[in-house]
Every structure is written in structure tokens, then in C-alpha cells.
Amino acid sequence: MALKTFPFQFDPRLAINSQLMYSPCPWTPSYHCPPTSSVPSTTCHAALLPNTLTRHPQTWTKEDVRVWLNWSAQEYAIEPVSPDKFDMNGKALCLLNRKDMMDRDPQSGDILFNALQQIITKSEVPLPFPFTPYPLRLPAGTNFPVPPVSPSPDFNQGGLLVLSGNTTQTTFSTPRSTPSFIPILPQPSHQRQPSPCQAQQEPISTAVTSIPGKGVLSPAPTSTDTDSAPSDGDSNIDDMDFQEADVRRVDLESGGNGNYYDEAFRLKCVATLKKAEPDCRLLWEFIHQLLIDAKYKHLVCWENVSDLVFRIVNPTGLAELWGHQKNRTNMTYEKLSRALRYYYKMNIIRKVPGKRLTYKFLQHPSTIRKGQRGARPHAKTNLMLQNGINEPKSEPSLDVGVPRLAISDQQSPSHMSSQTRRLSPATLTLSDRHSEMMPPPTLFRYNETHSNIHFVKGEIPIQDEPEDLSFKRESCNVIDNVDRSQGHVCQTNFQQEVGGTSEDNSSREREIGIKIEVTA
DNA sequence: GACCCGGAAGTGCC
DNA sequence: GGGCACTTCCGGGT
């Protein structure tokens, strides 16, 4: 490829561009961890963005949007974008999905969309569990302003999270990044049912619902969340009761004039964007994606959300969709269920006895580690015996309100694969018993210079499993990360092996500055 | 016949 | 090459 084809190949800014194009999607099924980048956020974009644009795009004014368009045109060497096509404020801008952007600007819409998502990702409060059904409890004694419940998040109050829902708890609502993705499957999008992952990727209503009395958070179905066949890439904007009239204006008449900056570059962008797409590679992830999207309730639905019990409504349809996802045309429910049965061993999913087609997540999907392998057919380990842990003989309790960490050999750090040992913050496993051996935690660090919390992803050295396993392990919800200056709360729910007393936990809380809440 | 179970071997990807 | 996460096939059970 001639250099002139990519005239800014060696432009230092390319680091920004390539980061934009290649960065992992900010919201993937493995949404345990906040978006991370090897590039410090300060060098990603914030330093280059005009000052007025360093705020969350939801807070941008129309003028900010215009500034951003101009900035983007320069930054990404695209044709100047007519401000008329984006005559809206930031809140409306954030509601545009890729298609909307491309409809408005066929030449540069996809680039603009990604640029915006990148900014959103970098500027919002990382949200480890976008739709965790955990009841989020405020740490005792935590005192900070409580924003009002709002079906339409008020971003002027900062990035909000949804906490809820017992009488003593408070409900927030949260913005959710609306990352963009391209259909996972190779087929033309109009020929297939969008994968659940893709469905997740479309901008959705940020409204969230707290189920009364349950303290459960679930995505509130939008008017598009119906049983009807999901549209592919249609904007939800028209379904939303938005104040901005211009948001409703769908500018579909803007046809491309073919005057793209460089077609080869555009194609490269598209190709690289596709690399960033997520995939529900794991069956449990796939099922969970289906479960949290009402569009797929004809395939699989929750029987009991709080207990994480779900029922396969249409085994054949589910299998077909899974086969579609995995590019296996011969997928059947028989095979799918075999894969599910491999999860039994790993305490990820369990059959609900006596109920056909009904299964239960033994842990909330957001706490399942990727390395917590669901299928290891040839693993004939007997680690439980080695560790002196007896495998529970009885059926796991099905009345668990809050999913707890299943105790199994696979949970044992010393038996994790190397990849498992590299844990995301959200799935951090601490060796509480040997806490004195732990280095000063650098898991989460507030960036005082920025309005938002920055999670610092660190590699946590895992201590070898102590020989004496008499200590108790419990599941903990670690709740915290209160940016008191903003009234932000980040919940970090991670599993922790606990061997200490409450006093131990208290000291650890003081030590690492987070609240440890034992829920087992 | 539909669903369920788990062993065994194969496959594709990383 | 090895590990992972299935996929495929199977015999058996309810």
C-alpha cells in the first residue's frame, strides 16, 4: 500500500486514531471490567479534546456538539460535517446509534460514532455491572447526596448509578454507554436475527427499573422491546419521549456523495472496527445476553430473576441461535444442553430439579470469571480432595437471593490457569487470609484531577492456596468507590475469599478504602 | 418422543 | 503444542 494512501500513517495523532479504531469495545459481555487501555486516559483524547468537550457528551450543549464535529473533522481527517445534520445537544447525540450517524453522514458517520463512543467511554464513570440484579447497598455510614430517581437520567447530576431497592436503599439510574458494534455474524444483517450481543449494542433506553420489594435492577423494556422481530439497527430515538424535537428528526435524505477522504482508509476503518466487536463466545454469556434482552424472551426467559433461574422457552430456537452465533449449522438443543451440563461441574449453571428446561445460574453472570472454565471434559482432576474440600453432595440451594460464590476447586487461586490469575478488578480474588501479604492495593484509584473515577487495572498477585483450608470462604459484595465530590457511586461486586472476621474486614476496608460486605 | 445425564472423542480457536 | 470451550456422538435413564 502506497504511503500516500494513508498520508498520516506516521502522524503522531495516529496513535489516537488507531486507539480509537482498535480499542476493545467499552461494553462487552465481560462487562466486569471498565474499559481499559494501555494508553493512559489522559493521553487518549482528553488532552487533545477542547476543554469544553472533556465533560461527558451527555452534558454537551448544541454548541459543544458543533465544536466536537469540527474537532472530529480535523482530528480524523474527515470531510467537514454539516452542523445541520447534528443539530442537537449532547444528550441527543448520545442517543444516536451507528446507523443514525451514518444516515446523517454516510461518509463519516461511523467514524464519528466511534469517536463519540470513545469519548463517552473515557468520560463516564466506569460501570462494572451495567445491569446487575444485585441489590446495591450503600455501605453503612455512607453519606452523600442522593439524586432523585429519574427514568431519564439527569447527567447534570453526574454519572448516576442505579442503586436500589429495599426500603432503606435508594435508587439511582445510570447512563449506559452505547458502544457501537457491527453484527457479529458474517451473514448480511437483514438475513438474520441480530445476535443478543448486537442487540445489546444498540443504544437502548437508559431507563432502568427497580423491581419493588426485590431490589432488583433490570433494564426497562423500551417500546422496541417487544416480541416483534427486532429491527436491525433501528434507532430507538423515535421511541423515546425526548424533549429535543430535533432528536426526533431523522435525517435520512442525506445520501453519500462518494467523496470520502480516502476510500481505502474508510474500508480500513470499517475492517478494524469489526475487529473491535464483541462476541458472546461463551454459552453462559450468550444465554445471559438473551435473558437481559426482552427481545429474546420467546427463546429464554427468567423464571426468577433474583434466584437467577431461567427457563428455555424454545429449545430449538435457542439452539439455532446459538448455532448461528457459533457458526454451527447443526446445533441442536441436545448439544447445547450438553454444553450446559459441563457448567454443572464448574458451578456456573445448574439444572433446576424437576423442572424441564429450567436452569439456574449459580453465580451471577457478572461474577463468573472467564477463566472459570465451563467445559473441561478431560480434566480429571481431583483437586477438591487434594484441598480437603468436599464437593457438596446436595443440590445447591435454589433459594439464594444474592448469588454467592460457589466453593469449588476451580475457584481456588492456586488452581487457576495463568489467564485466570490475571483478574479483572471486578472479579478480583483476594486472599484475605494472607492479607498481610498483599501489596498495597492498587485496584481502584481515584483520579482527583478528573471528575470521574478511574479504575486502574492491576494485576493482582495471587497467593498460593494455603494448605490449611479450614478457614471459611464467603462471597462478598464489595461496594464502594464513592466519588463524594460528584456523588458518584460505583459498585464493585467481586468475589472474595474471606477468612477473617468482621474486624479483619474492617481493617481491610480501612486498608484498601473499600467497603467489604459479606453476604454469604 | 422429549428431555436429561455424563463419558468419550473431536474440533476450532487462541 | 497445549489448553479451552465447546461440539458431536453415544448409551442409558425418566
Image: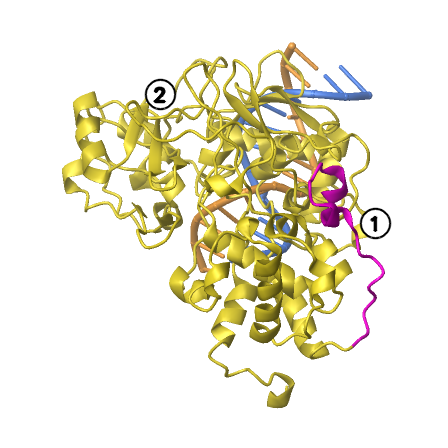
Chain colours: A yellow, B blue, C orange
Kindly identify the residue that appears in the image at 77 percent across and 30 percent down: A226
Residue topped by disc 1: A191
Q: Are marks 1 and 2 on the same chain?
A: yes
Query: Can you say whether A259 is above or below A47 in the image?
Result: below
Instruction: Report whether A20 appears left or right of A82.
Output: left
Q: Amino acid at mark 2?
A: Thr
Rendering quarter of residue A220: top right
Rendering quarter of residue A308: top right
Query: Can you say whether A398 is above or below A183 in the image?
Result: above
Depth check: give the residue in front, A349 or A482: A482
Instruction: Give the image location of residue A197, x and y in percent.
Output: 64, 44
Kindly identify the residue that appears in the image at 27 percent across and 25 percent down: A388
Residue topped by disc 2: A519
Q: Residues within 10 Å of mark 2 (few under 14, many from 20)?
A: some
Q: Amino acid at mark 1?
A: Gln
Instruction: Report the span colored magenta.
Output: A237-258
